[in-house]
Amino acid sequence: MGGQSGRLSGDEWQEWANQLLTCHHGPTDYQKVPDKDRGDAGLEGFCHSQGAVYQAYGCDEPIGVAERYKKQRDKMTADVGKFIKNRATLGKLFGTLKIRRWVLLVPCFDSKELVAHAAVKTAEVKAEKLPYVADDFCIVVCQEDDFVVERDRLLNAGASYIEIITEVATPEKLSNWSATNDALLETLEMKLSKLPKLQIASERAAFKRKVLGWYIEGQSVLEGLRKYPQVYERVIRSKAHRENYLAMAAVGGSASHELLTQAVTDLRDTLQQEAKELHHFSADKLAHEAVADWLLRCPLDFPEMASA
């Protein structure tokens, strides 16, 4: 699955989580804790009315269930430790507020062992008898889908005409990328060899360079969009939605060159509907990046040419 852009992680996920929480609780109830002045004391923010503190964590994807659990478990352990250790700092932040819930907010979690680990950590916190912890305190895990209403509201808010300017994919960039992606290049070569209009080796090589250019430039656009989490999420979801229907297009009887054109057109139209904030130049680059990605991986393929 090399070449696939992952979901939000790191600082981008923390920024998006804070937007979700502000939307959920309201800007006067949810207090974000900035981390630029000697760190964030192990929490993203807290809710005054509910006595809930939040720590957001998004690990790099894609990874397996076991590895995701391990990373999320270790993050919970480290930051619950800060919740105990930083009692002087947190006491000043909370004032008279009693904390009832410590929440780890992640893009997704899929292991019951993380819930079990939260129970162990709950007992550890209660044993410390911290002055800012309520009697019914517990640690819970939440994921993005628990905030679907807030997510959709934010995704529908948007800005206006975001254009990500990227550098042209130079021959040097193409060469550097190719040097570390032999398997993907073999897949692309195999697929392009099925196109009737690319049976001459030099023409096929030229088109392959063009496809790689689409991919590299489009990846730069995706990276730039991480500064706009709402729009980035729309793009990723739109691409995944179109990818689900590629197999149907491949058996629909269309000529191979029509499949390519239609795949670009379909995704570009979807992006212009679902991510209206995108400048049409960026939408076009993202549509071509998706087709290049699908060609490099498995989703988009062509029927074998009939024997002469």
Image (tube, rainbow, N blue to C red):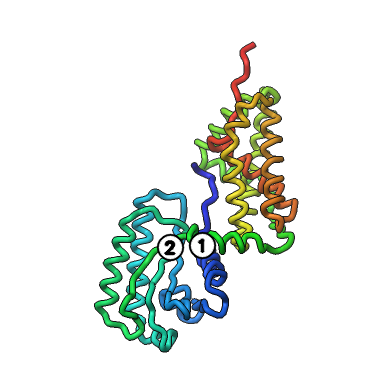
In the image, what residue type sits under mark 2?
A: Cys
Q: Where is 118 relative to 216, above or below?
A: below
Q: Residue at x 49, y 76 (%)?
A: 35
Q: Position of residue 127 (x, y in %)?
A: 24, 77
Measured Cα–Cα span from mark 1 to mark 2: 9 Å
Q: For this view, does 78 lie left or right of residue 21?
A: left
Location of residue 137 with respect to 200 vertically, above or below: below
Marks 1 & 2, CB-CB < 8 Å contact:
yes
- At x 41%, y 56%, the residue is 109
| Total labels drawn | 2
Residue annotated with mark 2: 142
Measuring 42% from the left and 78% from the top, which residue is drawn there? 51
Q: Upstream in the sequence, badge 1 or badge 2?
A: 2
User: Residue 250, relative to residue 14: is it above or below?
Assistant: above
Crowding near pointer 1: few (<14 within 10 Å), some, many (20+)?
some
- Amino acid carrying label 1: it is Phe
Residue visible at 53% across and 35% down? 298
- Considering the numbered disc 2 on the image, is that residue within a helix, a strand or a loop? strand
Residue 124 percent location from the top left of the image? 26, 73
Q: Which mark is residue 147?
A: 1
Of the 4 image quadrants, the one containing the C terminus is: top right
Decide if residue 100 is on the left or right side of residue 28: left
